[in-house]
Image (cartoon, helix red, strand yellow):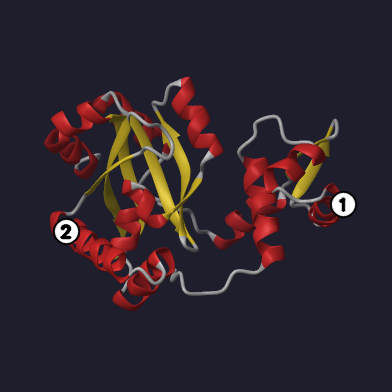
């Protein structure tokens, strides 16, 4: 789960195609995919054709949607992001808190939202367009980053902050606070300017497998912080 591995341009494009298609209920045309990836249509077409050939994409009325292969891999592996957080429990948490409830996992050097409940239309739209965020940029991402082993955590911070030593020290200090208090609180300005989120780790078999967050207008989260942290920790 470390973030020190090198990216590969083709792999990044394939991942971006799959994530873009997965986030669109009606699928995406080749032109739309090329625009999303800021890449030539001819280059994207070759990748899309290859993914469709092996079942990772299907074409329906000139729109590409996820094929059966990703689901088959998940079923075969027996691995799910967080067994203890079902869609029903996420919905229950959203109803109990009157906030949006979100589940995120680490994918490479990003936090990726894999499920959510209780969002209104603008927030749902913003989330569907921003499923992946750099780990330090969200409350859920900071939980995941703070939970990494020290070498992986420092590598991720170095990747995020580059040569800015001061920024790296500040981020590591903030992550230390997250570990000590057991939750992370952060504004969600990169998704919704007026929103904030509070997140806690989801621990299974002794390790952090995901982060669970509640999001609402900043003044609501700040005013109900203790209550929301309690709901997250006692969601069962």
Task: Give neighbour class at mark 1: few <14, some 14-19, many 20+ (Cα, 10 Å).
Answer: few
Q: Position of residue 122 (x, y in %)?
A: 47, 23
> Residue 42, which numbered label?
1
Q: Which residue is mark 2?
A: 177
Q: Secondary structure at mark 2?
A: helix
Classify residue 6 by image quadrant. Answer: bottom right
The quarter of the picture where the N terminus appears is bottom left
Q: Residue at x 65, y 43 (%)?
A: 20
Task: Give neighbour class at mark 2: few <14, some 14-19, many 20+ (Cα, 10 Å).
Answer: some
Q: Position of residue 164 (x, y in %)?
A: 35, 68
Q: Residue at x 46, y 40 (%)?
A: 115
On screen, 226 above or below 42?
above
The quarter of the picture where the C terminus appears is top left
Q: Is residue 236 left or right of residue 42?
A: left
Q: Nearer the viewer, residue 141 or 25?
A: 141
Q: Nearer the viewer, residue 123 or 236?
A: 123
How much space separates mark 1 and mark 2, taking CA atoms? 48 Å
On screen, 192 above or below 9?
above
Residue that protrudes farthest toward the bottom in the picture: 151
Q: Position of residue 213 (x, y in %)?
A: 31, 41
> Residue 55, which numbered label?
none
Q: Secondary structure at mark 1?
A: helix
Q: Position of residue 161 (x, y in %)?
A: 38, 65
Classify residue 207 by image quadrant. Answer: bottom left
Classify residue 194 by image quadrant. Answer: top left
Q: Nearer the viewer, residue 187 or 15?
A: 187
Q: Is residue 58 left or right of residue 112?
A: right
């Amino acid at each position: 789960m470390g973030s020190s591995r090198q990216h590969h341009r083709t792999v990044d494009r394939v991942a971006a195609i799959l994530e873009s298609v997965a986030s669109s209920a009606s699928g995406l045309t080749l032109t739309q995919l090329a625009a999303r990836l800021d890449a030539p249509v001819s280059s994207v077409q070759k990748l899309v054709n290859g993914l469709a050939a092996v079942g990772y994409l299907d074409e329906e009325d000139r729109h590409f949607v996820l094929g059966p292969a990703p689901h088959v891999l998940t079923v075969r592996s027996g691995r799910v992001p967080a067994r203890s957080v079902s869609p029903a429990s996420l919905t229950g948490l959203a109803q109990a808190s009157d906030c949006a409830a979100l589940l995120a996992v680490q994918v490479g050097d990003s936090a990726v939202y894999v499920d959510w409940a209780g969002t209104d239309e603008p927030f749902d739209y913003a989330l569907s367009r921003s499923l992946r965020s750099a780990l330090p940029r969200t409350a859920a991402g900071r939980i995941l980053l703070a939970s990494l082993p020290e070498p992986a955590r420092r590598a991720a911070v170095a990747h995020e902050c580059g040569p800015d030593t001061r920024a790296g020290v500040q981020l590591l200090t903030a992550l230390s606070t997250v570990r000590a208090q057991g939750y992370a609180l952060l504004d969600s300005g990169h998704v919704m300017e007026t929103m904030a989120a509070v997140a806690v780790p989801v621990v299974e078999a002794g390790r952090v497998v995901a982060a669970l967050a509640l999001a609402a207008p900043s003044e609501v989260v700040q005013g109900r912080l203790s209550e929301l942290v309690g709901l997250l920790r006692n969601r069962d």
